Amino acid sequence: MDESSLADAGLRTTLPRRLILNIMENSAQRHLGAEDIYRALHESGEEVGIATVYRVLTQFEQSGIVIRHRFDGDKAYYELNDEEHHDHMVCVECGRVFEFIDDAIEQRQREVASAAGFVLQDHSLCLYGVCEGMQHSDKCSMPKESEPGIYMVEEE
């Protein structure tokens, strides 16, 4: 995603939009809160207010550039919309968000929707549990700053 994504979404290219898009593209974390983005802007010496960050994220969400998630109920997290569907697992101990793709789960959801007479347009699945690192050592095996990636679930 680059600055042309802003124009494609019908948004003018402004400095705050470019800066926020750049942070989201280059962050090791794929799921960022507005406060995370605000902090990153200030750490890099940029003077962008928190209200501007929220406003730009709302515009990005409305235009389809980002997807908003509420993993813990209150705080909104944003990730760039890469057009590739995936689901999430959230560790309730360390807060780490893991992404995964499982074709069997996707197929079953389509079957359930069809059996109920639904034409499925979209869905989100978020599983909550305790990650392996926290189960064994009370320390997440993957630091929050590391790239979460997409964890493929092997079919048996």
Image (cartoon, rainbow, N blue to C red):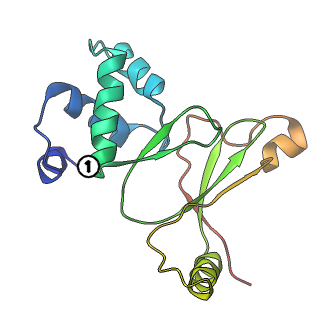
* 140 left or right, relative to 80: right
Which one is in front, 62 or 116?
116
Q: Position of residue 98 (x, y in %)?
A: 62, 52
Q: Secondary structure at mark 1?
A: helix
Which one is in front, 119 or 32?
119
**Residue 84 to residue 96: above or below:** below
Which one is in front, 74 or 104?
74
* 77 left or right, relative to 81: right
How many numbered marks, from 0 up? Answer: 1
Residue drawn at x 87%, y 38% is 137
**Residue 115 to residue 152: above or below:** below
Q: Residues within 10 Å of mark 1 (few under 14, many from 20)?
A: some
Name the residue that disc number 1 marks. Answer: 63
Q: Which residue is the extreme one toward the front?
A: 117
Q: Which residue is the extreme one toward the right?
A: 136
Residue drawn at x 40%, y 27% is 37
* 8 left or right, relative to 152: left
**Residue 66 to residue 36: above or below:** below
Which one is in front, 74 or 30?
74
* 136 left or right, relative to 144: right
Q: Position of residue 85 (x, y in %)?
A: 47, 66
Quadrant of the drawing holding the C terminus: bottom right
Residue drawn at x 43%, y 28% is 34
Q: Position of residue 8 (x, y in %)?
A: 14, 53
Q: Amino acid at mark 1?
A: Ser
Task: Residue 38: name its quadrant.
Answer: top left
Q: Position of residue 78 (x, y in %)?
A: 44, 41
